């Protein structure tokens, strides 16, 4: 009973840390975008976590963990199971309720990734409909293929905490959404990308540090127990990859562009975190540093490549979550305890399966929304800001206007 309590307390702490990551995402997104769209971004982030938890309770959890199923699609029924909750030997270390809440925090993250990529130009209602379908159905079905004991789990595909299952699942949808939406007004002039600076880089920096802290729960909780050796190793590899990613992104971007770009430094840290997430429990310190190093370099070139192919991603979500998510998943077959050609092939198959499913499903959802209700705000709304037009509010009201 004492071990159960210890494991359960650790899992609940990790759940709180993953919840805290939503503050990090909100800070990062508002910091890297313009002041006139702050309320809009915050509204989307609050919507995702609240509705995401309700959907995960009603359908998502039982889609993702359906028990006995055909490996592709299963459903254990609506709502949570009080009978399972009463069984304190559930999962040999923590309660059913804790399991639900921990997994529910992960579910909302996938749609948050899309929120940043479509910032400043997507209508709020179509985004909300997309988030409901993606978090409620697409993410848990995809998750069941590995974490629910589905066909990819049987194949040997490995994703410890979600480089693919969370980050790339969100990243593929972000890629499709950005492509269908088009770029912000003024992002490309005569075919060349123009910088649209964020309005609050200190807040963006705070967001990255909050996300890094949250990753202690994201990866540390994915051990699914308070095992001293495994949790300690996981936190060490997570932090080393983050540090290496940041330093290398800073060095590479400085060498290429001759300026010390803080936003690239920050995205390098996130790239390292996403990269280590698939195999944090399987790596040694040197492996973690190498994975983070490569992720940091990938970030710089990925951001440049995304600009070059005329995709407008205001916060770098596609580079961080999709491309570094793919890298981290493949890295499990290259570094660490599982390294080998067979494992690498399994990882590659997993990446391909998730790519196909997420691209097709997100395209269908967003394309239908585009053709029926439209997904892009008007030119006037975009130029004047979504806060005023979508919400009738200002994040930073000028009180001097009310003075006499």
Image (tube, rainbow, N blue to C red):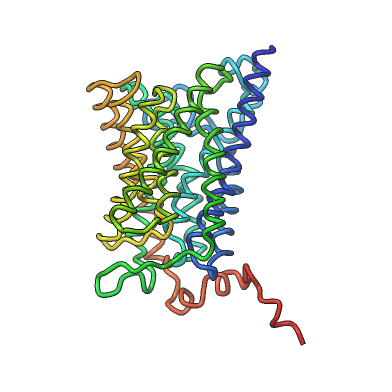
How far from the left and from the top, in percent, is residue 71?
37, 26
How far from the left and from the top, in percent, is residue 365?
39, 54
Q: Residue furthest right?
A: 404
Front one among 206 and 255 = 255
Give me the residue at 54% from left, 62% from top: 200
Query: Is 228 placed above or below 141 here?
Result: above
Query: Is 143 placed above or below 305 here?
Result: above
Quarter of the picture holding the C terminus: bottom right
Place residue 367 in its image quadrant. bottom left
Quarter of the picture holding the N terminus: top right
Give me the residue at 39% from left, 47% from top: 320
How far from the left and from the top, in percent, is residue 194?
34, 69
How far from the left and from the top, in percent, is residue 297?
31, 44
Front one among 400 and 390 = 400
Query: Is 279 placed above or below 130 here?
Result: above
Front one among 341 and 367 = 341
- Relative placement, left or right, of 15 versus 195 is right
- Relative placement, left or right, of 230 versus 53 is left
Front one among 294 and 166 = 294
- Relative placement, left or right, of 110 versus 327 is right
Number of residue marks: 0
């Amino acid at each position: 009973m004492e071990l159960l309590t210890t494991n359960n307390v650790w899992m609940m702490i990790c759940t709180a840390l993953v919840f805290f990551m939503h503050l990090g995402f909100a800070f990062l997104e508002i910091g890297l975008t313009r002041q006139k769209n702050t309320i809009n971004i915050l509204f989307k982030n609050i919507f995702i976590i609240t509705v995401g938890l309700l959907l995960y309770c009603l359908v998502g959890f039982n889609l993702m963990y359906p028990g006995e199923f055909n490996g592709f699609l299963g459903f254990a029924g609506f709502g949570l199971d009080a009978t399972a909750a009463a069984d304190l030997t559930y999962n040999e270390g923590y309660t059913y309720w804790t399991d639900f809440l921990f997994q529910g925090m992960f579910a909302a993250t996938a749609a948050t990734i899309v929120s940043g990529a479509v910032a400043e130009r997507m209508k709020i209602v179509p985004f909300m409909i997309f988030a409901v379908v993606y978090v409620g159905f697409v993410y848990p079905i995809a998750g069941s293929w590995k974490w629910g004991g589905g066909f990819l789990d049987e194949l040997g595909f490995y994703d410890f905490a979600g480089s693919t299952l969370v980050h790339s699942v969100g990243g593929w949808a972000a890629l499709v959404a950005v492509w269908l939406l088009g770029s912000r007004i003024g992002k490309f002039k005569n075919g060349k990308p123009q910088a649209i600076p964020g309005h609050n880089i200190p807040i963006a920096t705070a967001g990255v540090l909050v996300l890094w802290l949250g990753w202690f729960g994201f990866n540390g909780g994915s051990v699914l127990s308070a095992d001293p050796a495994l949790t300690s190793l996981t936190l060490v590899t997570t932090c080393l990859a983050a540090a290496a990613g940041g330093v290398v992104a800073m060095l590479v971007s400085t060498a290429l562009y001759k300026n010390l770009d803080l936003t690239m430094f920050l995205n390098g840290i996130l790239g390292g975190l996403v990269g280590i997430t698939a195999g944090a429990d399987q790596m040694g310190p040197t492996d973690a540093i190498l994975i983070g190093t490569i992720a940091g370099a990938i970030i710089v070139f990925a951001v440049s490549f995304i600009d070059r192919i005329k995709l407008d991603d205001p916060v770098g979500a596609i580079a961080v979550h999709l491309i570094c998510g793919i890298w981290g998943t493949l890295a499990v077959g290259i570094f660490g305890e599982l390294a080998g050609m067979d494992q690498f092939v399994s990882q590659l198959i997993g990446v391909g399966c998730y790519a196909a499913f997420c691209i097709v499903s997100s395209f269908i959802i967003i394309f239908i929304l585009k053709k029926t209700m439209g997904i892009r705000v008007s030119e006037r709304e975009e130029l004047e800001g979504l806060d005023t037009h979508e919400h009738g509010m200002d994040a930073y009201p000028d009180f001097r206007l009310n003075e006499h």
